[in-house]
């Protein structure tokens, strides 16, 4: 592969912009706060990004097919609290409890997929319904109270492997696996094909329904995994956990160059997008900007990013 | 009126009728294509051209009449059935997936796999796709330039060429082209027409539909004219002028 095609590949996946945004943010953040580039803070950022990034990878994949998944914040909560309840109240061993939480996530995602691909409800509405049901289910299951105090061996998930947080390694592993399957399996190719030209893809024999079902199942699985990771990190499952996380995940994907109309974008970019969102929150915290202002700041950055991204794309054409 | 041709047609449609609700779209049309023959199908809007080729490509069944391939009666339940019998169609409106590259488009829906066969999680054999795509395009004597280009980065003519190459990959015996040059600049349309002429050498029959009669006359061996669901003309291309064809299409005196 020569340099020219290589450059075009990078540009095609639109990772250049998120990478530059990330570098710029790191430079600005480290000049604004002496605490930013300390090992402690870096570890903290990597732990924080793990959960938002794992939600974002599932979300990005759904968006690549031209859909959207609004339920992931609520599915995070139900996955996390089912695992917590299975451990604390049912006394199940950790692996079984984790499997139970993941199964709940896969089921929620599967129902989303069925509603979207078979019943043909727009994904925005279908997953909005799932968001309400999963959040309500979590509140019913936990009586609206946090479930807390897990075994040390479960909390070890939020520990460190050398200098790196385990949570970060889990997320990184998921990204590597997922990126490989996007670029080397038939599933990955169909994800892009469905997002690019759904009717054309169906016409040449792509089973569009199965592709859609699978991306929603995977998105649900990721959300539940995020919930379990959050359990370990907080040593508690809060029934309100993950509220608004779907928006952070969508923002990460969009910042990372994933086009909301489907078919364009990459997981590498999404990961950078998740880092940008996390670092933004981190530096605002370090600068002691109030939480209320942080919302405004994040919204503004997202709007600016979206504008320059679409300009950039037009320019590239 | 109909020129006798030696041998038998590769495909023959006999007495095809089609109703859509109360509309009698095709009224007993006979239509045939010989191996290696380019048949231009012309007619005004609503004459039944699209209906006829949709029946031939298996999109929907005729209400009456039969289809014979090499003399044997066939029944298409789906476009897939028609493909398995060797009939491929290039639809301009469904064209390509813009965000995939050329080999990915040619092999979409039938990717060769390293492992995993037909499954969704099969590992793709990308090298084979690139090799075969390049060989296929070379056989068709077309130059796309960079195979890594996305379909959306290609010109209209190149896109149409890729769409035709995709249809030809399975080595069909009959290729149906519905307005293949509609969106193209003159120069590019000429390339597509050149491609159609090449197919003749490979003994592939072509049904060519176009609103541009000059194009139809430039490539077709035979011209079939439909009007209001009926066949009103079936001539060797060199025995018909464009003016006569237009008169047949619009009817009247």
Image (tube, coloured by chain):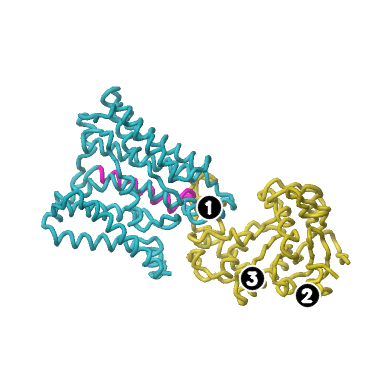
Q: Position of residue B248 (x, y in %)?
A: 81, 68
State which quadrant residue A95 falls in: top left
Q: Which residues are magenta?
A: A167-188
Residue A172 visible (yes or no): no
| Disc 1 target residue | A198
Callouts 1 and 2 on one subunit: no
Residue that badge 3 annotates: B192
Q: Residues within 10 Å of mark 2 (few under 14, many from 20)?
A: few
Tell me the quarter of the picture where residue B28 sits: bottom right
**Chain designation of label 1:** A
Q: Give a yes or no on whether discs 3 and 1 share a subunit.
A: no
Residue B242: image tag: 2
- Chain A: colour as depicted: cyan
Task: Please name whichever residue, A164 or A295, is drawn nearer the observer in this view of the structure.
Answer: A295
Quadrant position of the C terminus of chain A in the picture: bottom left
User: Mark 2 belongs to which subunit?
Assistant: B
- Residue B147, given in percent of the width and then of the height, sits at 51, 66
Q: Is residue A14 magenta?
A: no
- From the image, give the main secondary structure of the stretch colored magenta: helix
What distance separates the C-alpha of mark 1 from that of mark 2? Answer: 39 Å
Hue used for the chain lettered B: yellow
Locate residue B32: give its quadrant. Answer: bottom right
| Percent of width and height locating residue A32 | 14, 60
In this view, A252 is above or below B199: above
Q: Check chain identity for marks 2 and 3: say if they share one.
A: yes
A220 above or below A277? Answer: above
Q: Residues within 10 Å of mark 1 (few under 14, many from 20)?
A: many
Q: Position of residue B131 (x, y in %)?
A: 53, 62
Which SS class for mark 2?
helix
């Amino acid at each position: 592969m020569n340099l020219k095609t290589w450059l075009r590949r990078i540009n095609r996946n639109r990772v250049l912009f998120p990478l530059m945004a990330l570098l710029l943010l790191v430079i600005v953040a480290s000049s604004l706060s002496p605490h930013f580039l300390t090992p402690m803070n870096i570890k903290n950022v990597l732990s924080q990004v793990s959960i938002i990034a794992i939600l974002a990878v599932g979300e990005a994949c759904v968006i690549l097919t031209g859909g959207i998944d609004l339920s992931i914040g609520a599915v995070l909560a139900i996955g996390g609290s089912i695992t917590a309840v299975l451990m604390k109240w049912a006394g199940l061993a950790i692996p079984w409890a984790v499997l139970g939480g993941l199964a709940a996530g896969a089921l929620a995602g599967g129902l989303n997929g069925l509603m979207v691909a078979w019943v043909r409800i727009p994904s925005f509405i279908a997953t909005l319904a799932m968001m309400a049901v999963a959040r309500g289910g979590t509140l019913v299951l936990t009586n609206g109270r946090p479930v807390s105090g897990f075994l040390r061996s479960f909390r070890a998930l939020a520990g460190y492997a050398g200098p790196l947080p385990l949570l970060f390694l889990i997320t990184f592993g998921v990204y590597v696996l997922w990126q490989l399957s996007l670029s080397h399996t038939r599933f990955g190719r169909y994800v892009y094909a469905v997002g690019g030209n759904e009717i054309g893809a169906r016409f040449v024999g792509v089973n569009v329904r199965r592709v859609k079902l699978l991306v929603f199942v995977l998105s649900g699985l990721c959300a539940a995994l995020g919930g379990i990771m959050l359990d370990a990190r907080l040593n508690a499952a809060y029934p309100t956990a993950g509220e608004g996380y779907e928006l952070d995940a969508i923002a990460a994907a969009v910042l990372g160059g994933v086009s909301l109309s489907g078919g364009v974008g990459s997981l590498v970019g999404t990961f950078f997008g998740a880092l940008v969102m996390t670092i933004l929150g981190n530096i605002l915290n370090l600068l002691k900007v109030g939480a209320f202002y942080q919302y405004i700041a994040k919204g503004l950055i997202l709007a600016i990013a979206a504008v320059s991204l679409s300009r950039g794309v037009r320019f590239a054409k | 009126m109909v020129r006798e041709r030696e041998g038998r047609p590769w495909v023959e449609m006999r007495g095809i009728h089609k109703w859509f609700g109360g509309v009698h779209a095709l009224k007993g049309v006979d239509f045939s294509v010989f191996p290696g023959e380019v048949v231009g199908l012309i007619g005004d809007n609503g004459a039944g051209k699209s209906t006829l080729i949709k029946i031939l490509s298996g999109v929907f069944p005729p209400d009456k009449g039969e289809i014979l391939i090499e003399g044997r009666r066939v029944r298409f339940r789906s476009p897939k059935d028609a493909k398995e019998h060797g009939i491929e169609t290039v639809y301009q409106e469904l064209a390509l997936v813009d965000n995939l590259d050329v080999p990915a488009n040619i092999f979409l829906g039938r990717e060769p796999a390293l492992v995993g066969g037909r499954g969704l999680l099969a590992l793709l054999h990308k090298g084979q796709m690139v090799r075969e795509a390049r060989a296929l395009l070379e056989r068709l004597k077309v130059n796309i330039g960079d195979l890594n280009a996305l379909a959306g980065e290609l010109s209209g003519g190149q896109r149409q060429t890729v769409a035709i190459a995709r249809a030809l990959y399975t080595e069909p015996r009959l290729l149906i082209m519905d307005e293949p040059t509609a969106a193209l600049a003159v120069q590019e349309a000429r390339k597509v027409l050149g491609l159609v002429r090449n197919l003749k050498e490979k003994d592939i029959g072509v049904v060519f539909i176009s609103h541009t009669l000059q194009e139809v006359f430039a490539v077709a061996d035979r011209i079939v004219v439909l009007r209001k669901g009926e066949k009103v003309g079936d001539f060797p291309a060199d025995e018909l002028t464009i003016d006569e064809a237009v008169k047949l299409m619009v009817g009247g005196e």
